[in-house]
Amino acid sequence: MSVREALYRLHQRAWSAWARRRYRGDFDRVRSFCLFVGYPRSGHSIVGALLNAHRHAVISHELNAPELILQGCSRNALYARILARAHWFNLRGNRSNHSYQVRNQWQGRFTELRVIGDKRGGAVTRCIAAYPDFLSRVRGLVGVPLRLIHVVRNPFDNISAISIRHHLSLEESVDYYFSHCRTTAALGELCDRGEVITVRHEDMIRDPRSVLSALCDFLSLELYPGYADDCCSVIFMAPTFTRRKLPWPPPLVRAVEQHARAYPFLAGYEFRMTDDDSRSGLAGA
């Protein structure tokens, strides 16, 4: 075990134990529990970071809450682990492969805890596929409304990013991506009305204020002065299209476009670059 990993584990044990005692009353006042669903490398991280910057929300970065829930973690222990992870990520400067620091806001802290959750969309999707009753377990554990955020990105960029980051062939990445699509397509049957919102990553880049407003409305969070401005200031990234980084065989392009037509949430996406793509830009792989 590396020194960094040892320090992280020590911090998490100590901080979460303290948080369970310190914030027990705050946990009772939480109004909704939030998880992300979808696909690795789809743009979940920036959305989670912006919500985590809200003064009434804490969204941890890849704690892997599903694993804790399946292990029988109590509500207060789960919430304390989320706070500990968010605190640690803030100490590191809110960055992984990109910087997600929103200056002047509340990452890793809160004034009143109304929304709490974890950002690890691919893990939640795989968990739902493996355990069809998983969402029922979550509802029973937290005892407050469940809110699921489904982030979608152009499948060609998403698949390319999966291939690069997970060291898979394009063909393997296509299969991996659409296995997640099959699960997210079933959310309408697994979820109550109003439990899921779908966000297009490209819309977040193009019009972050509108998307952030919709997300806050979904989570019953107010857009207080300065919050949206500070969040928007970190959105404008240099355009990169991950599909350009790999050689896509034309037959595979056609296969992906054919598969995508089965999923309404992928409507309008294609391999060909459009003028709108060039103006908006996407986050990196």
Image: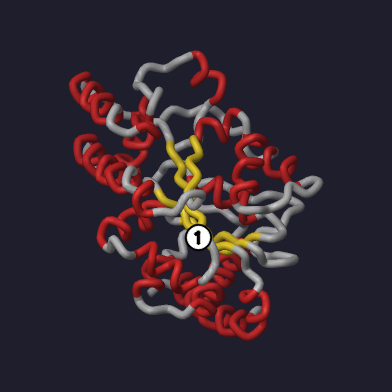
Task: Answer with left or right where residue 265 lies relative to residue 278.
Answer: left
- Report the front residue among 11 and 86: 86
Indicate the quadrant containing the N terminus: top left, top right, bottom left or bottom right: bottom left
Residue 176, how many percent across, how many down? 25, 44
Q: Residue at x 45, y 15 (%)?
A: 274
Residue type indicated by callout 1: Leu
> Which residue is disc 1 drawn over?
146
> Which residue is depicted at the point 43% across and 27% down?
241
Answer left or right for 89 relative to 102.
left
Residue closest to the eye, 10 or 63: 63
Residue at 30% across, 30% down: 260
Query: Which color scheme does this rendered protein use?
Result: secondary structure
Q: Secondary structure at mark 1?
A: strand
Q: Nearer the viewer, residue 130 or 227?
A: 130
Examine the rendered structure and indicate whether residue 73 appears above or below residue 251: below
View extreme (right): residue: 225
Q: Residues within 10 Å of mark 1 (few under 14, many from 20)?
A: many
Q: Residue 268: which quarter of the image?
A: top left
Q: Quadrant of the C terminus?
A: top left
Tell me if 234 is positioned left or right of 188 in this view.
right
Query: Can residue 60 be seen?
Result: no
- Asked if residue 241 shows in the view, the reply is yes
Residue 44 rendering spot, x and y as whole percentages = 48, 47
Q: Residue 264 occupies which quadrant of the picture? A: top left
Looking at the image, is 206 positioned above or below residue 48? above
- Image location of residue 40, percent across then percent down: 38, 47
Where does the image place residue 91, in percent across and percent down from the top left? 62, 64
Q: Is residue 28 left or right of residue 272?
A: right
- Name which residue lies at 57% across and 59% down: 59
